[in-house]
Amino acid sequence: MKNRIVRAVAGSFILISLLLAMYVNINWLWFTTFVGANLLQSAFTKWCLLEDILKNFGIKESN
């Protein structure tokens, strides 16, 4: 369950920030960059802040 939530949140953040960059201000692309960089670093370090937050809320790891 936790992995699906992390992917859904990351994907939503990227799509929302792209829409904000198109319709509000181009600087929202920095947020897109931040999310992408976090995804990349978590691939190497196997650590994700959102996973820690979800664990504190009692959401279990998916199988």
Image (cartoon, helix red, strand yellow):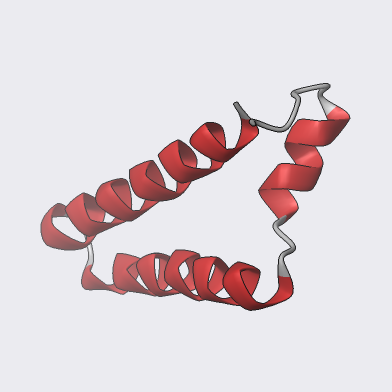
Query: Residue 45 location, x and y as percent?
Result: 72, 74
38 relative position to 61: left or right: left
Quadrant of the rendered image containing residue 23: bottom left
- Rendered location of residue 5, percent (x, y): 53, 33
Residue 42 vs residue 16, the one in the foreground = 42
**In terms of depth relative to the viewer, which is nearer, 19 or 61?**
61
Q: In the image as oriented, which residue stretches furthest toward the left?
A: 22
Q: Residue at x 26, y 49 (%)?
A: 15
Residue 37: percent from left, percent from top: 50, 76
Which residue shows up at 72% across the image and 44% down it? Answer: 51
Judge whether 28 appears above or below 50 on screen: below
Could you tell whether 25 is left or right of 47 in the image? left
Name, please, the residue furthest toward the top. Answer: 58
Quarter of the picture containing the C terminus is top right
Residue 59, horizontal then vertical, whole percent: 75, 23
Occupied quadrant, residue 54? top right
Vertical placement of residue 57 versus 44, above or below: above
Quadrant location, the N terminus: top right
View extreme (front): residue: 63
Indicate left or right for 16 with 36 as reference.
left
